[in-house]
Image: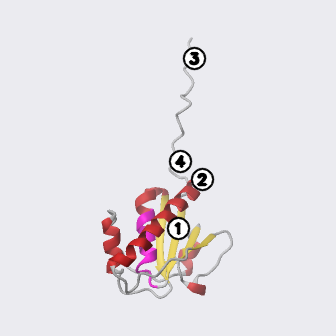
Amino acid sequence: MTASPPPSPSASPSPSPSAPRASVLFVCVHNAGRSQMAAGFLDHLAGDRVEVRSAGSVPGRRVNPAAVEAMKEVGIDISAATPKILTTEAVRASDYVITMGCGDACPVFPGKTYLDWSLDDPAGRGVEAVRPIRDAIKSRIEGLIAEIDAEA
């Protein structure tokens, strides 16, 4: 009787379908620019590995057109996104809460990771002024993904 060969050392186990995904909530005042771009990048770069939410303490009526255009330039379409009100439930359901100028409006719960990203507000600015904000957000999202992956 011959023994089966041992598994290849490079073979890695598949993630369990029931493994919990990290959940991230991005919060800014109007949920129309920074938080929408951050959500778009995280959704695009992390895929289904991370659950993405965004909200605003005083949500606007629509996503900033300059933010939509700036994201379209890098192949991410956030045109269907809509500003949402920040709720206690959204914070409670998130592992990471990343604020971008929401002030003290964000409820705080133990066991969550809170980060505050100081970024210029793209409100009222053209796409030329939004591009550097977009690029700064992308850089932070890449770092966040690395942090989430390291903790998984």
Q: Which residue is mark 3?
A: 3
Q: Which residue is mark 2?
A: 150
Observer-nearest of 65 and 12: 65
Q: Nearer the viewer, mark 2 or mark 3?
A: 2
Q: Nearer the viewer, mark 1 or mark 3?
A: 1
Check the image and report above or below for 9 versus 128. Answer: above
Which color scheme does this rendered protein use?
A: secondary structure
* Amino acid type assigned to the residue bearing label 1 in the image: Val
Check the image and report above or below for 60 versus 33. Answer: below
Q: Which residue is mark 4?
A: 16
Disc 4 to disc 3, how far (Cα)? 28 Å
Pinpoint residue 86: horizontal percent, then vertical percent: 51, 82
Crowding near the residue tagged with mark 2, few <14, some 14–19, many ≥20 C-alpha atoms within 10 Å: few
Is 95 magenta? The answer is no
Examine the image and state in which quarter residue 65 appears. bottom left
Q: Which residue appears at 45% of the width and 65% of the height?
A: 138
